[in-house]
């Protein structure tokens, strides 16, 4: 089923595909956070699961500025988490895709692992940060993007990009060869 939306996915992971531990990122990478902010602010809308939304709120006390949050959840969000100006809770993929289209047709999927898997068939662009470290985790990025359906269109790294970065990273962009 084709959707007229420009859906991207933004993920940071180790070569072993670890993306998280205990609902948080297990590294400190200011350079990746800058990249994440630029990509997601340009899209204007971010799609995430409830746990990722709660993690953002626990870290920042507010939703990410300059972006509308679509939170896919089976449970209603507490009133303090659901704000019509910046956060909308939805119950299905179809509702999410319809809301993205209504909001201009562009969005970034930002996690967690189950949300990545559910939206991967609709994604056109992957923004992948590879974190060169051996890190234990309990959340993994399992979506396959190394086959003929994907083409790397931009690659840089591995570099220590910022003096405060914990690890070297590479920044890669992949385009789906056949759009969903």
Image (tube, rainbow, N blue to C red):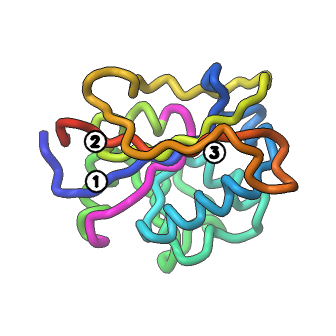
Whether pointer 3 and pointer 1 mark residues with C-beta atoms closer than 8 Å, the reply is no
How packed mark 3 is, by other alpha carbons closer than 10 Å (few <14, some 14-19, many 20 or more), is some
Residue 83: tell me if it is visible: yes
Residue 73 visible, this angle: no
Residue 51: which disc?
3
Q: Is residue 40 above or below residue 18?
A: below
Q: Nearer the viewer, mark 2 or mark 1?
A: 2
SS under mark 1: helix
The residue that appears at 52% across and 41% down in the rendered structure is 128
Percent across and percent down for residue 74 are: 48, 43
Q: Earlier in the sequence, mark 2 or mark 1?
A: 1
135 magenta-colored: no
The reply, left or right, for residue 109 in relation to residue 158 is: left
Eye-nearest disc, 2 or 3: 2
Q: Is residue 110 magenta?
A: yes
| Label whose residue precedes the other's in the sequence (3 or 1) | 3
- Say which mark, if any, is on residue 75: none
| Residue at the left extreme, as displayed | 1
Instruction: Give the secondary structure at mark 3.
Output: helix
Q: What residue would you read off at disc 2? A: 122
**Residue at mark 1:** 97
108 vs 82, nearest the viewer: 108
Task: Please provide the residue range marked out in magenta.
Answer: 103-114
Q: Residue at x 76, y 50 (%)?
A: 29
Residue 133 position by quadrant: top right
């Amino acid at each position: 089923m084709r959707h007229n939306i420009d859906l991207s996915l933004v993920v940071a992971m180790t070569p072993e595909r670890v993306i998280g531990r205990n609902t948080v990122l297990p590294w400190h990478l200011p350079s990746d956070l800058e990249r994440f902010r630029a990509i997601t602010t340009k899209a204007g809308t971010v799609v995430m699961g409830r746990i990722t939304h709660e993690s953002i709120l626990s870290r920042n006390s507010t939703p990410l500025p300059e972006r509308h949050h679509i939170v896919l959840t089976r449970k209603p969000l507490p009133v303090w988490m659901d704000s019509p100006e910046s956060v909308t809770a939805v119950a299905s993929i179809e509702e999410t895709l319809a809301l993205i289209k209504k909001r201009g047709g562009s969005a970034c999927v930002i996690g967690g692992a189950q949300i990545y898997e559910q939206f991967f068939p609709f994604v056109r662009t992957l923004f992948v940060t590879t974190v060169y470290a051996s890190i234990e985790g309990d959340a993994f990025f399992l979506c396959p993007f190394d086959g003929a359906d994907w083409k790397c269109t931009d690659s840089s790294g591995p570099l220590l990009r910022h003096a405060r970065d914990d690890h070297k990273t590479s920044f890669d962009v992949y385009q789906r060869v056949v759009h969903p």
